[in-house]
């Protein structure tokens, strides 16, 4: 499944090599330390993390993992950065793929080449390795991919004789039908505090926000495909055809009350949906994300890896925990068996394990993992995450609440984010090619 998308992040190795040269990159740990016992602190916002930690502890008496839930989004990455600076970082932490290059280049995570490099090389196809092997070193272990999906209320669509859209033109028509059928309901959401869906849909449309040219970065956050996506979603938000909501609440309140009956998300969203609104069992279904021309195309919204933050005093035991939660079949079962996680494993050998462990009664027995596989196989190649994604994301999020009321244009938001990104890169000593 992952082999087909080998080129998805083909620029990552070169890109991180540039980044590491400019910023110092981190240290080589060399051989794995002998100690694989003791206490490990674990930070994660990923659904099912508490169950995974408990399952590990019950089967590994020599290692005690203490789990701490943390907020998601930029708040989490600021918290982790501050903990590294203060010397109070956890031993294991989740780092989403967009943020890993920045954390690696700034020395906020350990080089895991000696501890887990062999496992990554042996257990993951090239497309997954490219997410965590940057600048010739291994910085984390992949857990999941996050191909785009569309979640929709099948009962609402059936009741109002609405078809499931396969193109973005049809999606707009669907949002108009939803609003007409129920003036309080909407057929989509533009998150006002998370740029992830916008980034994934720009990726799907063929946008390429970052690339490398010789010894320089090329930044094109507002390229034509991305501006097309931004104009489309900005118009949906401005005309009130989709909600403009924060990702947690009031979004989940709108779902609970039947005011959001369709939305674009990713593979992990199926678990989040059934865990958050269990009373809507049997009402929801999953579909491929619409495309511009009707041909399969996708991007990734999220996806997580696990790293050892700089300063861990028990990296041997931490590495054992990471290996189990990312490569062991029992670890995979622990992620999904509670029903709160519907992860799509980065290790293709583990897809059958997660599929068997995740019950689909909530979705009427629908084979959602088959749809996830199709979406993953349709991910467009050529997307590279930038070296200062925290700054890029902040620049976007700062303006998103203004898009719905018309005081800001979403294409202009991308242009503003591009300028902010270039400024931050130059301040960090990175060379940026002229447009």
Image (cartoon, grey):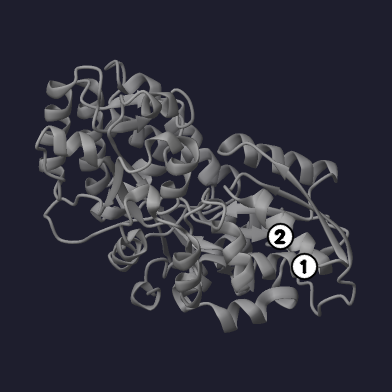
Q: At which x and y percent is residue 370? A: 32, 66
**Residue 262's image quarter?**
top left
383 sits left or right of 343 in the view: left
The correct choice, above or below, for 406 with respect to 267 in the image is above
In-front residue for pair 270/97: 270
What residue is at 37 percent from the left and 51 percent from the top? Answer: 209
User: Is 393 located above or below residue 32 in the figure?
Assistant: above
Residue tagged by mark 1? 59
Q: 115 or 84: which is nearer to us?
A: 115
Find residue 175 and report its horizontal and vertical position in percent: 17, 31
Does residue 107 appear in this view?
no
Whether residue 105 appears in this view of the structure is yes
Q: Element type at marker 1? A: helix
Q: In the figure, 323 relative to 300: above or below?
A: below
Q: Are marks 2 and 1 in contact (CB under 8 Å)?
A: yes
Residue closer to the observer: 95 or 425: 95
Residue 55 circle label: 2
Q: Nearer the viewer, residue 57 or 32?
A: 57
Residue at the spot 21% in from the left edge and 28% down from the top edge: 236
Q: Give the percent coordinates (x, y) of residue 333.
A: 58, 64
Label 1: how many Cα within 10 Å (few below 14, some 14–19, many 20+): few
Q: Residues within 10 Å of mark 2 (few under 14, many from 20)?
A: some
Measuring 58% from the left and 58% from the top, which residue is drawn there?
335
State left or right for residue 155 relative to residue 129: left
Where is residue 170 shown, x and y percent of the image?
A: 11, 42
Residue 208 horizontal side relative to residue 31, left or right:
left
Quote the CA–CA distance across marks 2 and 1: 7 Å
């Amino acid at each position: 499944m992952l082999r087909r998308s080998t080129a998805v992040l083909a620029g990552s190795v070169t890109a991180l090599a540039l980044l590491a040269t400019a910023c110092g990159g981190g240290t080589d740990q060399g051989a794995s330390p002998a100690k694989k016992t003791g206490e490990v602190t674990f930070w994660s916002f990923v659904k099912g993390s508490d169950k995974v930690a408990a399952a590990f502890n019950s089967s590994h008496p020599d290692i005690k993992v203490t789990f701490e839930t943390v907020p998601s989004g930029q708040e989490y990455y600021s918290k982790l950065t501050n903990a590294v600076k203060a010397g109070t970082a956890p031993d294991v932490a989740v780092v989403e793929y967009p943020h890993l290059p920045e954390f690696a280049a700034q020395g906020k995570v350990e080089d895991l080449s000696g501890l887990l490099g062999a496992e990554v090389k042996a257990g993951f196809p090239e497309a997954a390795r490219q997410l965590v092997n940057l600048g010739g070193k291994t910085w984390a272990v992949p857990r999941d991919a996050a191909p785009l999906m569309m979640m929709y209320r099948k009962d609402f669509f059936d009741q109002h004789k609405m078809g499931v859209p396969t193109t973005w033109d049809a999606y707009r028509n669907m949002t108009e039908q939803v609003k007409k059928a129920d003036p309080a309901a909407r057929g989509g959401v533009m998150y006002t505090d998370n740029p992830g869906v916008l980034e994934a849909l720009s990726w799907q449309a063929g946008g390429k926000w970052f690339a490398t040219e010789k010894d320089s970065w090329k930044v094109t956050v507002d390229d034509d495909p991305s501006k097309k996506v931004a104009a489309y979603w900005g118009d949906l938000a401005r005309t009130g055809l989709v909600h403009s909501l924060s990702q947690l609440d009031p979004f989940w309140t709108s779902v609970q009350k039947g005011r959001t009956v369709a939305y674009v998300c990713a593979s992990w969203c199926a678990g989040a949906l059934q865990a958050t609104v269990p009373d809507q069992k049997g009402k929801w279904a999953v579909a491929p994300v619409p495309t511009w021309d009707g041909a399969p195309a996708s991007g990734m919204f999220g996806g997580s890896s696990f790293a050892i933050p700089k300063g861990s005093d028990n990296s041997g035991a931490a590495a054992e925990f990471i290996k189990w939660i990312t490569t062991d079949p029992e670890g995979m079962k622990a992620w999904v068996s509670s029903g709160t996680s519907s992860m799509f494993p980065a290790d293709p050998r583990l897809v059958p394990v997660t599929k068997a462990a995740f019950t689909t009664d909530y979705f009427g027995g629908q084979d959602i993992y088959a749809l996830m596989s199709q979406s993953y196989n349709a991910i467009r190649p050529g997307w590279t995450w930038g070296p200062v994604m925290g700054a890029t994301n902040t620049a976007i999020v700062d303006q998103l609440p203004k898009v719905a009321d018309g005081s800001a244009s979403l294409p202009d938001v991308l242009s503003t984010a591009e300028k902010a990104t270039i400024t931050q890169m130059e301040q960090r000593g990175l060379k940026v090619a002229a447009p």
